[in-house]
Image (cartoon, rainbow, N blue to C red):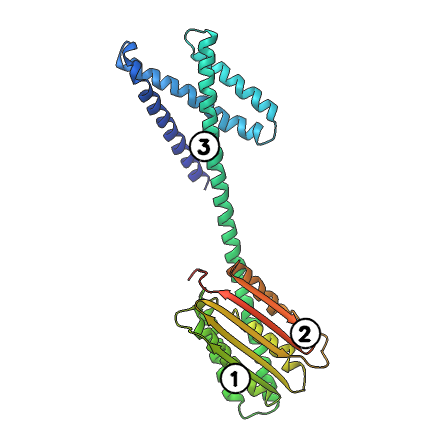
Amino acid sequence: MAKTSLKQVLLINIGAFLLVLILEILSNLVIRDKFESTYSFYMWGVTYTVYIMGVIWINHFIYIPYLLDKKRYISFIILLLGTIFIAAYIKSHEKSWTSVYKISFFLIYSTGTGMAAFFLRRNLMIKKENAEKEKLQKETELKYLKEQVNPHFLFNSLNSIYSLSRQQSPETPELVMQLSELMRYQLESSKKDRVLLKEELEFIENYLLLEEKRLSNRCNIEFQINGELRGLKIAPMLLIPFVENAIKHGAQSTNQQSAIDISVTIDQKSLSFCVVNSKPSVITTSERNGFGLENVKRRLNLLYPEAHVLTIEDMADQYRIDLSIDLKTKTND
C-alpha cells in the first residue's frame, strides 16, 4: 500500500513539473529571440520550473505536514515567505528589489495555486477513504445483522414445532417439513442482498400457516396483499421480525382469543406494511422491543436511509406497526 502511494505521489509530481515547464515555455515564446540559443531558452525554462516546483515541494512535504497541520501558523508563514524571498533573490539575475519583488510575487501565486491543488486532492482522498471505510463498516454490520436473523428465526420456529410435538399433534411431521422449506428459503436468501418481494411475502404466508396450526383456534390471522408485486425486490428477512413480534407478544403470550391482522399494499414502487395484533389483558413481564425489532430497525437504517418510515404504536388493546419503504432505492444485488 505504501509503495502504491509513493508511486502515485511521484507520478503526480512529475506530471506537475512537466505541466509547469510546458506552461513556462509556452508563455515565454515571445521572448525566445532574447536568448543566445534554443538550448539556453529551454534550460532557462527548466531552471525557472525547478525554482517554482522546489518552493512548492518544500511547502508540501515539509512546511504543511510539520507546521501547518500542527497549527504552528506563525512559523509556517514566516518560513514559507522566507523561502520564497530567498528563492526569488537567488533566481534574480539583476539582484534588484524590483526583480526580486516580481519573482517573489510570482512564486507566491504559484505556491498558492499549488497549495489549493494540494488541499483539494487531499480532501478528495480523505472523502474517498472515509466513504470506503463507511461502506466496509456498513457491509460488515449488515452481514452480522443478517446472520443474527437465522438463529433468531430458527429458535422461534423450533419452539412452535416443540409445542405441537408436546401436544402429540398428527400434523407435526408435516410441519417439520414445512419448517425445513422455510429454513431452505432463509438460507438461500441470506446469500443475496435483495430477493423478490413476491417470494418474501410467500415466505411470510407459509410461516403464518405454520403458526396458525400451532395456535389452533385461539388466534385469528388475516394476511392481505394489495397491488402489483411483479419485479419488485426487497432486502431478505426484513419483514418477518414484525410478524414474529406480533405472534410472540400477542397470541403466544395468552390463552385468550387473539387476532393478528397483516396487510401489504403496493403503490407503484412504494411498499406499505402494516401489522396489528391484539394485546392480552395481562401482559407478561418481557421487553416489548426485543432483539428482533432492534435488529430490523438497524437494518432499515443501513439499507434504506431516508427511504423508509417506521411507526410503532403501543395502545391499550393492540400493538400496531406501520412501515413504508421506497423500493426504488437500490441496494447491491
Whether 101 is drawn above or below 285: the answer is: above
| CB contact under 8 Å: marks 3 and 2 | no
Rendered location of residue 178, percent (x, y): 49, 83
Q: Residues within 10 Å of mark 2 (few under 14, many from 20)?
A: few
Q: Earlier in the sequence, mark 3 or mark 1?
A: 3
Q: Quadrant of the C terminus?
A: bottom left
Rendered location of residue 144, percent (x, y): 54, 62
State the residue at coordinates (50%, 44%).
127
Q: Which three-letter amino acid code belongs to the residue tagged 3?
A: Ala
Report the mark closest to the observer, 2 or 1. Answer: 2
Along the viewing direction, whichever of 12 and 81 lies nearer the viewer: 81
Disc 3 versus disc 1: distance between alpha carbons?
64 Å
Q: Which three-letter amino acid code belongs to the residue tagged 1?
A: Leu
Q: Is residue 19 left or right of residue 176?
A: left
Q: Residues within 10 Å of mark 3 (few under 14, many from 20)?
A: few
Q: Look at the numbered disc 1 and give the secondary structure of its residue.
A: helix
Disc 3 versus disc 2: distance between alpha carbons?
59 Å
Residue assigned mark 1: 209
Disc 2 versus disc 1: distance between alpha carbons?
27 Å
Residue assigned mark 2: 315
Report the mark closest to the observer, 3 or 2. Answer: 2
